[in-house]
Image (cartoon, helix red, strand yellow):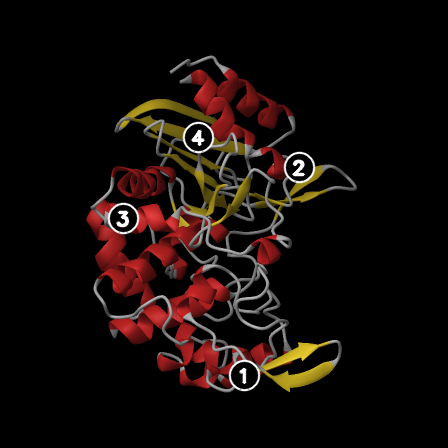
Amino acid sequence: MKQNGELLKQLRYFEEQGIPSIDCVVYHKGECVFRHQSGFSDEAHTRPINGSERYNIYSCSKLITCVAVLQLIEKDIMRQDDPVYEFLPEFRHIMKLIDGQLMEVKNTMTIRHLLTMTAGFTYNNTTDNIRRGQEETHGVMETREAMKYLARDPLISEPGEVWNYSLCHDVLAAVVEEASGQRFGLYVKENIFDRVGMKSSTFLLPENELSEISAQYVYDTQTKTYNPCGPQIWKSKLGSGYESGGAGCISCVDDYIAFLEALRSGETLLRRNTVAQMIQPQISRNAEKALWIPKSYTYGLGVRCPKPGSDVQDYGWGGAAGAYAAILPDAEASLFYVQHVRNSPVQQLRPLLPQYLLKDL
């Protein structure tokens, strides 16, 4: 791989935009062929990035959660078309709010709807019901308990009809708990993290390990400054015991690239035919209208994936603070990029990374 090619040029551009720290790694045919690090892991700029830093990877958590669900499907513990209420009974009788009218949902919400973001949820995790749950659980509100409050909020559409980025994968984490009989984080540790050697990854970080989190910033578009905002997960941690399947993973670059490589190479985490299904288009053209990722992509089971006939090759997802995961099966390559900036000025440029990787290969 070209060490001074297009990928490095793009990363240099990110640095020119002031991104406080960058770590990007590429594996090709099972070997690390590229690593670029820059910046500092602390707000005082005294500790250069060395690769051991942990990050809130936000929505890159979704890939892990969906792999957990697909494992349980492989074990025949659940099926994609199982009703969600079989695992979470509070979702048996749910309502929808359409044009100001509250009415009962007609379609049965299924595991497939959760995997494909078509269940009808939103990403509003500050509703009166969620706030009530936080108060009644004294701020703890564990993952399974939170669903009892979320189920009281009306959906915005019939399950299966519309793609809407939402809390679907948080609900999946609770489904994993019920289906496996284990706390979500423990199931993931035993069946994903431990299998691929992800020793620095967790969905529930102890308070005494917060110092290991790389400095996190939020970009102010008015002043064009990067302002420190503390190490905690932003908005998605609904309680001290809450493990957000959609945005709650803390990980490091070496851990996450090991996860991506395990998916790419097959069998360690999922069967090859399961991965093949995961990365195939899974939503209707009507549902696809609301998809806001680049038009060359559509949506599979918890991942962006190439539209048939498009010129892109990668599947994966990205996170709110800038993490970006890409697996390129045909090129036998995986890429993971991480920064720790919310509202980043380069957020919309990340899809260029796998394209430049292909050029350099």
Measured as percent of width and height from the top left, residue 336 is found at 42, 36
Q: Quadrant of the N terminus?
A: top left
Query: Of label 1 and label 2, which has the lower sequence position?
Result: 1
The residues tagged by marks 3 and 2 sit, at their Cα atoms, a distance apart of 38 Å
Residue at the disc numbered 4: 24
Q: Nearer the viewer, residue 98 or 241?
A: 98
Residue at the disc numbered 1: 94
The amino acid marked with disc number 1 is Ile
Indicate the secondary structure of the residue bearing disc 4: strand
Indicate the secondary structure of the residue bearing disc 3: helix
Query: Of label 1 and label 3, which has the lower sequence position?
Result: 1
Measured as percent of width and height from the top left, residue 81 is found at 38, 69
Q: Which residue is drawn at the image coordinates 47% and 29% (left, top)?
A: 354
Left or right, residue 71 beside residue 354: left
Q: Look at the image and tell me whether residue 46 can be seen.
A: no
Q: Within 10 Å of the Cα at label 4, are there few (<14), some (14-19), or many (20+) other Cα atoms? A: many
Are circles 1 and 3 on residues that touch, CB within 8 Å? no
Residue at the disc numbered 2: 345
Q: Nearer the viewer, residue 138 or 358?
A: 358
Establish if 203 lies above or below 91.
above
The residues tagged by marks 4 and 3 sit, at their Cα atoms, a distance apart of 29 Å
Query: Of label 3 and label 2, which has the lower sequence position?
Result: 3
Measured as percent of width and height from the top left, residue 306 is found at 48, 39
